[in-house]
Image: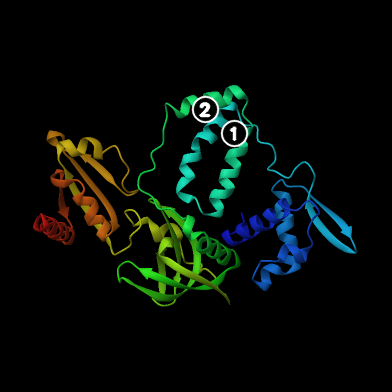
Amino acid sequence: MPRNDQAIRQLIVLKKLESSRQGLTLEQLADGLDSSATRHPRTLRRDLDAIESAGYPLLTERVDGRTRWKLLDGVRQVPALRLSPTELMALTLSRRLIAPLEGTAVHTSLQSALNKAGAALPPEGLMLVQQLEGTFSIGLGPHKRYKRHREVVERVTQAIAEKKRIQMRYNSASRGRVTRREVDPYRLWYASGGLYLIGYCHLRHEPRMFAVERIKSVTPTDLPYQIPLHFDFEAFVEDSLTVMRGPRIEVELIFEKGTAAWAKDRVWHTSQQLTRLPGGKMRMTFTVAESRELVGWVLSFGSGVRVVRPESLRTAVKQEAEKICAIW
């Protein structure tokens, strides 16, 4: 399986081929790829081989003494998927799920795919979709919008594909001011209604998470980087309750009967363990990052939950509750 940077680069090359009926030379395919390594003819030929192995037959032609690559006529789309009418309807109904990504290249491509899925439905299928939309709705909850941040997302995505360091101006929420950062961008991560850049921050000398909407500008550089072999993305984010990171702590909560009845039906964190207690109460334990969002999450249950441990979380929740009472 190709690494993330290879997959993104091959997607860029495939998009170029899709948009050209006359075919493209290696020089034209390399246009827009910043890294000299990724523009090398040998690298591009490997990418073309990978694209063809993925099911996209390619044709080479000699035009004016130069070789051009193009998608074989009739297979300019994904090889036909034998989707049932109900599968096609499910795809069209999923359109609302990608709404938060509006303003990104991912949203544009997914929207195009869903439009094609809808067009493949027979008239009676479209009527059924419309009926289902009237009886089945998807609520997204709070989420951010990225229409105004398209350029930032595109530049970051390109830098990830090219493995090039970026310079950026970042408005830190905790510090309340704009700082200049040099970052090796590892990955874009969508979680809890927001898009985040995970990368190595040369100012803080450690991997950090940056909210994309707080990135004021991005300037690409020619400085290459490599993701350390020991960096584990899943391990990096697994401690967060949603997105905030901090020291790892073991949490134990006791939920009262009324709150336990609905709190038990949700997966709040992958490490959570639930234990039924007498009187309809419930014990929940999990290991998570100590952060402001954890305090806010506990407070969202009001008097329906009690912090057993750690003491630092008990104190933080109590102090925040006292502040809330003070302003009322």
Depth check: 324 or 10 in front?
324
Q: Position of residue 139 (x, y in %)?
A: 38, 39
Q: Position of residue 170 (x, y in %)?
A: 41, 70
User: Among all residues in the image, which is located at the extreme top?
Assistant: 124
Which amino acid, mark 2? Val
297 sits to left or right of 4: left
Q: Are marks 1 and 2 in contact (CB under 8 Å)?
A: yes
Give the position of the C terminus as an image quadrant: bottom left
User: Among all residues in the image, which is located at the extreme right?
Assistant: 65
Give me the disc on residue 12.
Answer: none
Give neighbour class at mark 1: few <14, some 14-19, many 20+ (Cα, 10 Å): many
Above-or-below relation of 110 to 200: above
Depth check: 4 or 249 in front?
4
Which amino acid, mark 1? Gly
316 sits to left or right of 69: left
Q: Which residue is mark 2?
A: 129
Above-or-below relation of 258 to 269: above
Q: Which residue is mark 1?
A: 118
Above-or-below relation of 170 to 117: below
Q: Position of residue 30 (x, y in %)?
A: 71, 65
Q: Earlier in the sequence, mark 1 or mark 2?
A: 1
Q: Position of residue 154 (x, y in %)?
A: 55, 61
Q: Secondary structure at mark 2?
A: helix
Give neighbour class at mark 2: few <14, some 14-19, many 20+ (Cα, 10 Å): many
Q: Secondary structure at mark 1?
A: helix
Residue in the picture at 51% in, 54% down = 103
